[in-house]
Amino acid sequence: MSPQQAKSAKTHRVILHLDMDAFFAAVEQLDFPQYRGKPVVVGADPQQGRGRGVVSTASYEARKFGIHSAMPISRAYRLCPNAIYVRGRYTRYQQVSKQVMQILRRFVPTIQQISIDEAFLDATDVVHLYESPLDLGKKIKQAIQSELGLTASLGIAPNKFIAKVASDLDKPDGLTICEPGQEKAFLDPLPIRALWGVGEKTAKKLTDMGFRTIGDIANTPPEKMVALLGNWGLHIWKLANGIDHRPIISHGPRKSISEETTFAEDVGDLETLEQVLCKIADRLSTTMRRKGLKGRTITFKIRWEDFETHTRSKTLPDFINDARILRAVALGLLHNFGRLEKKVRLVGIGVSQLNTMGGEQLSLFAKPKSRQQETVERLLEEMKTKFGEGVVERAMHINREIPEK
Ligand code: TTP
Ligand code: MG
């Protein structure tokens, strides 16, 4: 890399914005093949044109009839009575959304999800692993297509604003790049509606003031924009000039998972605490397995009647989500406290150092069953040696019908 290129690589960020195409409708077409290639409208019940409520989204086939998000469903029905009208299945969309985000995270760790079907990615530090930013973009789109059967549109640019504008330019199944240095040429001809945050009403206001394109705003002195529209005027003037330093705020993957129980009445006997801990361990294990999570550090939390709170942790050699191990480790950590000097208000178990890769990756790296079984047995033996035979036995023979808040 020449010094020039090195400098340029440092000064330009590579920001991606991904937005799924006709998301809810696309998931319906995915799950119900008979809907494919047809106008599908997700939203309220049209009730033969008398329905109240609005359109959530429409497939691209339905958009040809002029149907779009937020339109009254009755109007959509008038435009295309033969479309397939379905109610939303939000849990399913949420599930697919998670899968999309997991795929994105595999390519680029710095990701900021901004809605159910949209995310920003800062690929500055990983783009060198690919032939080019476009190559990275193609690979992400291909992964979503081949693994989920859905299309997405992607914008690549030196900042968030332009990446967002770019992802919308060639929908559906689009891939648009704005190279560094091309910001103004890219933005100038676009209509002001393309400016982020400019809705129908604002667009009309700006049009009435004589602004038609983003270039019209970019070429107006910033003082004039402030005089016309206050601080917001300066904000859109900066965007129109391709200036946007906002960082990608990555919440990152989940770092820990926990379950706890606060007792209706403070508890003074060890037996009850053991029983509750076992229940918590079972619940936590079920949630972890459902989410495809395994972790290495198990933390036991106890809050005494005077609200004093303590935690004790143990880090295991392997990633686990097995209820028996969670129980045994949590009970061992509880017994570390010795005799109960005070009553207990709350107990909980947390698991951190999670292996947060998606279910598929987990199974890819999963050990053969016999080896996993070995790990369980070894840990159980270890717990018995450390805390006595009773710890595991007690955990195994628990009466589960205990009152608990
Ligand atoms: P969008 O990404 O705005 O729309 P879309 O994915 O359906 O279509 P495209 O991106 O290809 O233009 O919104 C994502 C989902 O959010 C959309 O599928 C349904 C839901 N949604 C609503 O329920 N009401 C709305 O008014 C909008 C805009 C979206
Ligand atoms: Mg979308």
Image (cartoon, rainbow, N blue to C red):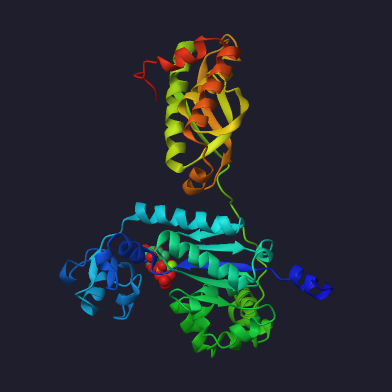
Query: Where 375 sits versus 389, above or below?
Result: below
Numbered label tally: 0
Q: Position of residue 204 (x, y in %)?
A: 46, 83
Q: Position of residue 192 (x, y in %)?
A: 52, 83
Taking depth in this image into account, of 236 and 164 the one nearest to the observer is 164
Q: Residue furthest right?
A: 3
Instruction: Please tell me which residue is depicted at 46% across the width and 27% down the height of the picture.
Output: 323
Depth check, front residue: 292 or 168: 292
> Could you tell me residue 137's position as x and y percent?
56, 69
Q: Residue furthest bottom?
A: 210
Foreground: 225 or 79? 79
User: In which quadrant is the N terminus drawn?
Assistant: bottom right
Question: In the rendered image, which quarter contains the C terminus?
Answer: top left
Task: Give the residue drawn at x 51%, y 31%.
Answer: 372
User: Residue lying farthest left?
Assistant: 48
* Residue 276: percent from left, percent from top: 44, 21
**Of residues 58 and 216, which is closer to you in this image?**
58
Can residue 268 be seen at all in this image of the molecule? Answer: no
**Residue 5, quarter of the rendered image:** bottom right
Q: Which image quarter: residue 80?
A: bottom left
Q: Quadrant of ligand 2?
A: bottom left
Q: Residue at x 58, y 18 (%)?
A: 382
Horizontally, residue 245 falls left or right of residue 303, namely right
Residue 190 visible in the shown view: yes
Q: Is residue 145 above or below residue 356?
A: below
